[in-house]
Amino acid sequence: MKPVTHIDPQPWMMAPESVAVMAALHAGETPDSDALVALFVGGCVRDSLLGRPVGDIDIATVLAPEEVSNRLQAADLKVVPTGLAHGTVTAVAEGKPFEITTLRVDVRTDGRRATVSFTNDWAADAARRDFTVNALFADSAGAIFDPVGGLADIKARRIRFVGDAEQRIREDVLRLLRFFRFYAQFGAAPPDRDAIAACAKLADLLPTLSNERVATELFKLLAAPDPATTMTLMSANGVLRHFLPEAQEIDRLAALVTVDGIVDHADPLRRLAAGLKIDATGADAIADRLRLSNADRARLAKLVESAGRFNRDMSDPARRATLYRLGADLWRDRVLIDWAEEIALGTPQNRHTTDGWRELYELPEEWTAPVFPVQGNDVLALGVPAGPAVGRYLAQIEAWWIDGGFVANRAACLDRLSEVIGKD
Ligand code: ATP
Ligand code: MG
């Protein structure tokens, strides 16, 4: 295999940990030998060519997994046998993981996993990869190898399956979601026609995928510059309803994407919430399906609440009371979602509306909620026995303190507390 072009060696290629891993894999090889031993592959090469930030680093090698482990260990690198059956070993160098996979072909696939056999044929390994843009290899000096024509597709920002789209999706249904995810991340319109036709035809296979794999792709899609356009495409091709039927508010998501741009802050979970038409029960079901953390689950539930929507005319005291109760993060979430809702409902937007929402969004920077100056011990000290009554008194005094615009100090709150307890 010969290089088709060269790029400047990238910072991540020259980073000490990458150099250490590559040196370990090449140990004992003749430096000027024509045989390639190990090359960077996949996302890191693709993203470098696209000028996008590089995430994790994957390496392809002709070495068998045991040999990979031996050479890494000989260089004192940590080895984790992550996917030995598929030829993958993870090396950890200076705390950074590198997935090293032996060149392989998939001999049998069932839509979810493959039985593999190893090879030393780089083109065969490229051919088992999902998209041409993901099948480019690079060496540490920036030489680029392109067995399946990925470079031209990178330049055109074209997401194209390696080989027959339908066959490739049947082998592994996750590729269907990956197609839309990569399209959202860096694809240019129009999407590849063969790919879209195959995705539309096979979308009903999506429920066979594990929830974890779906969730990972969904959140990568939501983090893309504009997930709404891609989700509209997924909806139009009957794909969305097979894995996220609740996504019935794509207009509001599209509006949120615009708003994200105005405030320069995007958040995948907030975007998810904006795109869904669900109640609290629906939020719980989605949290289960997407395996959300407890914190994310609670946040999603708050974000889909339709009660108490914000509007730009909220009085100052109402703003502060609401910000105090929600906390700054949830406050900003709600401002952005309700702003998006206003746009999606068709309210004309102008400088006045934008300034109004922006002012709401920035309130946490101008005003910090004070700390409620009374605690449970204060209630106990006034003779209330430990139990639910303590919390009730606290909540009552807190409400009074909030209604009064947070001006009452500790002494005033304690006076009020004695008064209330005395009356009962
Ligand atoms: P990113 O890391 O940005 O999500 P990536 O392309 O690096 O994108 P990984 O999941 O890290 O994705 O996979 C690394 C490489 O392995 C891919 O670039 C591709 O060549 C190959 N690959 C990953 N998943 C599949 C799949 N389902 N089918 C075929 N090849 C795949
Ligand atoms: Mg990757």
Image (cartoon, helix red, strand yellow):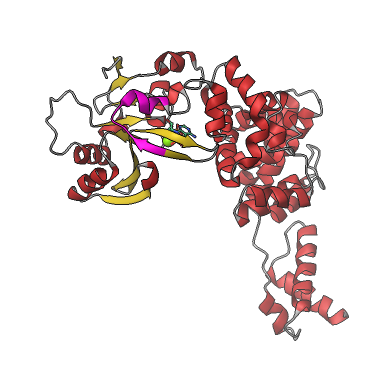
The reply to whether the magenta stretch includes residue 126 is: yes
Residue 224 located left or right of residue 15: right
Q: Is residue 332 positioned above or below 153 on the image? A: below
Where residue 355 sits, quadrant-wise, is top right
**Farthest residue, direction right:** 423
For the N terminus, the image quarter is top left
Residue appearing at x 31%, y 20% in the figure: 144
Residue in front for this viewpoint, 317 or 248: 248
For the C terminus, the image quarter is bottom right
Residue in front for this viewpoint, 292 or 340: 292
Residue appearing at x 40%, y 38% in the figure: 116
Residue appearing at x 74%, y 51% in the figure: 322
Residue 113 located left or right of residue 96: right
The reply to whether the magenta stretch includes residue 103 is: no
Residue appearing at x 35%, y 19% in the figure: 146
Residue 249 located left or right of residue 95: right
Tell me residue 153's x, y (percent).
46, 16
Query: Where ligand 1 lies, by quadrant?
Result: top left
Residue in front for this viewpoint, 160 or 6: 160
Tell me residue 230's x, y (percent).
63, 25
Q: Is residue 107 visible?
A: yes
Q: Is residue 291 positioned above or below 22 on the image? A: below
What segment is highlighted magenta in the picture?
A: 116-127
Tell me residue 77's x, y (percent).
24, 49
Where residue 220 sits, quadrant-wise, is top right
